[in-house]
Image (spheres, coloured by chain):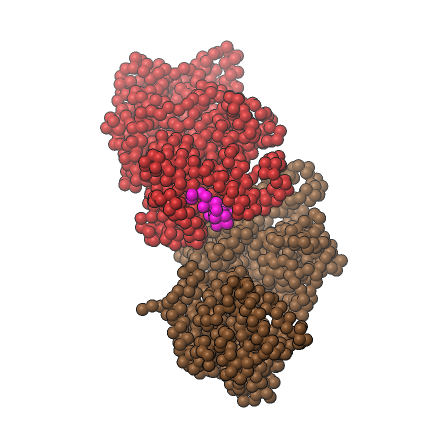
Chain colours: A brown, B red
Amino acid sequence: MSKKYVYLFEEGNAKMKALLGGKGANLAEMTNIGLPVPPGLTVSTDACRTYYENGKRINDEIISQIHEGLNVIEEKTGKKFGDRTNPLLVSVRSGAAFSMPGMMDTILNLGLNDKTVMAVGEKTENLRFAYDSYRRFIQMFSDVVLDIPKFRFEAVLDKYKDRNGYENDTQLTVVDLKDIVDEYKSIVKKETGKEFAQDPNEQLIESINAVFRSWNNARAIAYRNLYDIPHNLGTAVNVQSMVFGNMGEDSGTGVAFTRNPATGEKKLYGEFLMDAQGEDVVAGIRTPKSIDELKEIMPEIYEQFDTITKNLETHYKDMQDIEFTIEQGKLYILQTRNGKRTINASLKVAVDMALEGLLTEDEAVLRIDPKQLDQLLHPTFDGATMEMATPIAKGLPASPGAATGKVYFTADDAVKAAASGEKVILVRKETSPEDIEGMNISQGILTSRGGMTSHAAVVARGMGKCCVAGCETVKVDEELKIFAVGDIRILEGEYISLDGSTGKIYKGSIKTVEPTLSGDFAKLMIWADSKRVLGVRTNADTPKDAETAISFGAEGIGLCRTEHMFFEENRIPVVREMILSDNKNQRQKALDKLLPMQKSDFKGLFSVMKGKPVTIRLLDPPLHEFLPTDEQDIVKLADEMQMAVNDIKEVIHSLQEFNPMLGHRGCRLAITYPEIAQMQAQAIIEAAIEVIEEENTTIIPEIMIPLVGIKAELDYVKKIVVDTVEKIMAEKGKKIDYLVGTMIEVPRAAVIADEIAKDADFFSFGTNDLTQMTFGFSRDDAGKFISEYREKEVLTEDPFQSVDVEGVGKLVDMAVKLGRETKPELKMGICGEHGGDPKSIEFFHKIGLDYISCSPFRVPIARLAAAQSALRASGQQGSDLSK
Amino acid sequence: MSKKYVYLFEEGNAKMKALLGGKGANLAEMTNIGLPVPPGLTVSTDACRTYYENGKRINDEIISQIHEGLNVIEEKTGKKFGDRTNPLLVSVRSGAAFSMPGMMDTILNLGLNDKTVMAVGEKTENLRFAYDSYRRFIQMFSDVVLDIPKFRFEAVLDKYKDRNGYENDTQLTVVDLKDIVDEYKSIVKKETGKEFAQDPNEQLIESINAVFRSWNNARAIAYRNLYDIPHNLGTAVNVQSMVFGNMGEDSGTGVAFTRNPATGEKKLYGEFLMDAQGEDVVAGIRTPKSIDELKEIMPEIYEQFDTITKNLETHYKDMQDIEFTIEQGKLYILQTRNGKRTINASLKVAVDMALEGLLTEDEAVLRIDPKQLDQLLHPTFDGATMEMATPIAKGLPASPGAATGKVYFTADDAVKAAASGEKVILVRKETSPEDIEGMNISQGILTSRGGMTSHAAVVARGMGKCCVAGCETVKVDEELKIFAVGDIRILEGEYISLDGSTGKIYKGSIKTVEPTLSGDFAKLMIWADSKRVLGVRTNADTPKDAETAISFGAEGIGLCRTEHMFFEENRIPVVREMILSDNKNQRQKALDKLLPMQKSDFKGLFSVMKGKPVTIRLLDPPLHEFLPTDEQDIVKLADEMQMAVNDIKEVIHSLQEFNPMLGHRGCRLAITYPEIAQMQAQAIIEAAIEVIEEENTTIIPEIMIPLVGIKAELDYVKKIVVDTVEKIMAEKGKKIDYLVGTMIEVPRAAVIADEIAKDADFFSFGTNDLTQMTFGFSRDDAGKFISEYREKEVLTEDPFQSVDVEGVGKLVDMAVKLGRETKPELKMGICGEHGGDPKSIEFFHKIGLDYISCSPFRVPIARLAAAQSALRASGQQGSDLSK
């Protein structure tokens, strides 16, 4: 038996989305629950995949199944393709499993030709309508199937309107339209060398062919890349008998949402036009009427429609976006789908539906796309101003939010401008730790190099600050203080605007709107917290970050990067003094100056966290990161340090590495310079003891040793830490509990986790570095080829954004199992960027981690994603999140 | 019951080396087979470890066991510690499981004090001998226990000799010696503030204490680092009753080998002195006599000794190094051990013993240390000239052999000098692929940066050329053409000499000697080949390398690095043209020029290999490696390419990476530029077809895709290769077999090896990169902290030299198992540097690889190590290789 490629609407249902596409599955579902859907069929996504395997040809088997299906439709409608008295007209629409606006969408009125146009005219007693439909059909078909630009046809239309002084298309007479059709056909002849296809079967197959082809057009590929949709799914095609909203005053067409998609308010929301086809509603030529007005114009139809929409919402348990047509007083439903909505509407609809009893709390929690929460927490562009702006370039959407400000090219300049009250956007080729201060006072950051996990991106996300990174079309000259995109030049002090959620860059200033958190948000998060198993901590280096995170519901600090504290203006000279020391004594003197500073940092954190766990990582980055790179700064430093410029250059040179990522950093530093780890351990424990005494609270500091790959590394550094801590406690006469654990971020650590677990009180997976080393991808360099990999389908996702379950995940899972073999109660968390990614969180839940830690602004996302993971793992299925 | 720390000689045997040390175990063994060994005891290595655990104190339990043992010795000898008529004197010697010349060695005559010296004088009727012994004892004890410099004592001795006009120590009178003893004792008083210890028990415990302490002196640690000996083993101490070779003309002492340690000739070989103590033989003050002369002086003793040595050799089944003493006409054996020998002697002894029936062939094969074979294959310094030279610096022994020549600082200068007939040493901060030509014509290479697997080291080993790498005390200024070590300055054109086996650098020229391969070597390798299971291939990029490897017994090429071919003088411009192309057409044009060059390379290789398998890896390094780095070269290139300097700099800048190791290289290049892989596949297959036709042979080319970490990477590049190959074969009308496989060198590849195996015809483990990524160690940068790690015992071995079985090995083993799950017959080899390391080879044998591949000069080592691995795995145990 041959495979089934074509399904009548009555043969499908809502669950067959992968095969029939979202649109087809819903048409089938609606047909089967008895709604007035015009008969039709769906050519499956399978057929599309076969088309591509087959060298972009629709094979005969599929064509014959299409004809069989058409026969049934002909029977049902009593119409026939190409019939001279009662011809069948159909629409052809693409419909993938995921909604894809980038693809070809619709051809209407297919089946019209020089003969059937007369039959339609006669049958509807409206020859003008028939020719208008034919003209529209030729134009649509030419556009999407024959690739003839629309403007060719529009020019003809305009010519007739101008010549006759018409204002609207409706003023065109039947004679005008007949002439226009002739002119359209000669355009086709001229452009393609062939007559416009008269055979409806040929029209149909060519249209289906065009839909399949459109799956791989540039926009569609770009869209899929943007939304992580696999490229090999294919699209389905829906062929449906036409109904006409433009058959006179008893006809019309419209779209409606069962609730308000902007606010979530429970009230039918939509618009319609009488005597119009679907495209007229969206085309903006005539102003549509609000759906309420339908009540007055056609009260019975409104009643019937209202009932249907309520049923559909109850049936699908979600807010529906419905297309309908009234043909000569009869209502048809053409499409229903879960309606797209703002995050505020999303929250209100979910919470309302749960309160109405339509959803359970679990279902409501599952209903929200955690990624969308981001919009709630960051400024956005004002919709109105936004409309007018055209982006000049697009980089990576590295940290969400919208920002507008004057461009500055160095951290120093940015700081000065901000101090004088300006709103600043920092533009750099790439940022380095020296830029922290400048980033901190900026509205947003733009870089021309680096990926989603470059320095700029990671730090900006941590700060909750808008960042567009790695925008390679932007050429930055930091010396001349100018950047260029093609011919556009932006000088220091000029305004630009950044959208960190899309990566778009705009010239000039765009108004931004601050977010507000609704009661629905709070209610939903309470429900979510009651479902989740994973703890949610935050990555925070300062009391300010920690406060933000706590306000978003963080339950502890999973990662405090002590080096970030080293970059502050009053500290960096001391840090440099330490690095430039050529003996231990000199280094110790510098460390003695750093000690009280670090101690006060930690006191601040402990104090804000009020007894919640705080994991502090010992110094991690290679020392050269703390030294200046350009000549001017080196000379300045030489002055400050009273050293020869050449001596400083010598040190900088000696610290240079071919691959700093794999160089002298992490615990390797503590092994070379035990006195640094000693100072940090001392600062941590003294801070804890003092805050415990001052605030009468409990603190169990968690000291974390980074980059361990060898058991003896952990032992070596742990001994330094423990010896120091015990010494301090003995001196102070105060015993407190503390933990010493390690990052698992080097592949070798995952492989020997059973050994490492013997002397670690906890594991924290550093999945950023683990991803780098497991793939052999430098995250600072991989940006270029990762995007190429995604285009060529070598990678379906960026492994730095969502954890690579197959490879990196297997190592993490292995380490969890090995670690728990040694120590069943071993506490394990993850503090890489993946801690804020919902898909990754689902994996971390599955393999049994205790907590995830993410940047403060991702905490709500993590809480929701963790709850959803727990619900799904216990068998709950939310309705599909892709709408 | 308390633990046993002290063993009488009669309580041990040869197998207890770990506990009793090599010396103690042998003394026990000899005692038990009835040889005339002076009674004694061994304080175990356990006691030493306890000493360190105990804060460097010998605990009471051990002290009491020592006293119990001493009692037995006193009974046996009839002498007593401190006795005024018949005092017991003992020697105290260190003795670890591995021979360790860096450690404190011996104290003789312990037990002498102001009282017992008289008793000894009386008993031996030789008061002069007694006082001479006492003086020697004070000096030795002061040196090793009390840390008083020797020269203090020597000055006194010289004073007496000068004052009396003596030429020899033997002219000192008893009165002189008594005065000298008094002066010695006052030196001790002055230096330590205490009287010289008179209590023999105190003398003994302090001496044992000093031996334990010496385990961790700087020299001993350095020695262990050099020979990969773990630092936690500890040493044993042997306490043995003294016998005296200096009790007159019927006494004497000497050392002898059962065979000639330089040539292996089967003939007793050694020297002795009458009326002397052991140290006199080696001290060089008196000239010792050849052992043959003993036959004339004391024929019976000689006979007895000869018989004993023969028995010892038969007993230990190895050439013995024996110390003996004759005390008043009675022969004592003080020590026997496997004798150190040259590699030539080693081969002759093993082969002879097998032919004599003393060893089986298997045992003979197991007897040779594969690492020692290196000496056979490279030039060495002439022994005589060598003696005189003092090294000025020491770097890493990166590639063995000896070299002498004039210093040049750039590849160009070196090439020019060599062309005019000079012997050249290339000195660089670090080498890069641009230096290949200069390296090739040099006698040896010296670099101041980089580790054992830096570019210089890897390439030099491949060329079989002497290299000292990463010598950080050498300051190189390539512009000024000078290098300095401390105050020593070496200018261009001055002579230096390098020892690549020790890492030592000498000023001036030292004569080198070319190696010769003996018949014993050939015979042993034939035996070895018949035992081994692992195939042995070579890493070779040129027909010359391949020829060398074949002459050393290589069975195929496991790795041909095609990029090395790109660096040749006539090719690099074309390669650069390809890289600087800004579109595919331009790039294709350059590739078309490269095609015939690559094809002729491959034809050369196939032709030399005569049907043996050849694995060719597609282009691997990042493209920036092919572009020049310094201004001058860039300007030159701009000229050649008729491009603007700034445009070239732009390209170079755009190719720069933060971590090139983890950047755009390997299969990532082939995915971005499929045309490069196409060109290479075409060159390979056309070359194979042509050589098959021209030489009427069989060739199955193995095309290897590097750096695969994702299954789709392999698929993508494999498709390019297969499409190209099939197209060429169709064009040529000739079908040949070929394989397409992949490197497993990215941790992720090991983790998903089951997936990768689905479409790979073979795996080749690239353990260099795998080690880098698994540890997170950049091999170019890790040199510095790896040596620190070894000092601090964080690492016991350099994982780039010997495969890290626990971590990297676990991944390799996992990949082997996963790969064979998918494809049981999957061919697997290893082509990293570890392929030439005996310890690693043993591991690769164990996990079931099919072959190892190493640089040509390591092939014999690999063959022997593979044979030994197979023998050991089947239960054969060789005698210990550490002598």
Q: Nearer the viewer, residue A476 or A757?
A: A476
Q: Residue at x 62, y 71 (%)?
A: A157
Q: Quadrant of the N terminus of chain A?
A: bottom left
**What residue occupies the far top of the structure in this picture?**
B165
- Tell me the chief SS of the magenta region: helix
Q: Nearer the viewer, residue A669 or A414?
A: A414
Q: Quadrant of residue B854?
A: top left
Q: Nearer the viewer, residue B644 or A835?
A: B644
Q: Residue at x 70, y 63 (%)?
A: A509
Q: Residue at x 69, y 66 (%)?
A: A511
Left or right of B639: which side holds B44?
Answer: left
Tell whether position B686 is magenta. no
Reply above or below: A835 against A330: above
**What residue occupies the far left of the structure in this picture?**
B357
Reply above or below: B699 against B310: below
Whether residue B12 is visible here, answered yes or no, is no
Whether residue B162 is visible here, answered yes or no, is yes
The magenta segment: B660-682
Q: Nearer the viewer, residue B355 or A471?
A: A471
Residue A463: x and y in percent read: 62, 60
Residue B334: x and y in percent read: 34, 26
Tell whether position B668 is magenta. yes
Numbered circles on residues, count: 0
Residue A744: x and y in percent read: 48, 53
Residue A37: x and y in percent read: 47, 80
Q: Residue at x 65, y 74 (%)?
A: A161
Reply above or below: B470 against A351: above
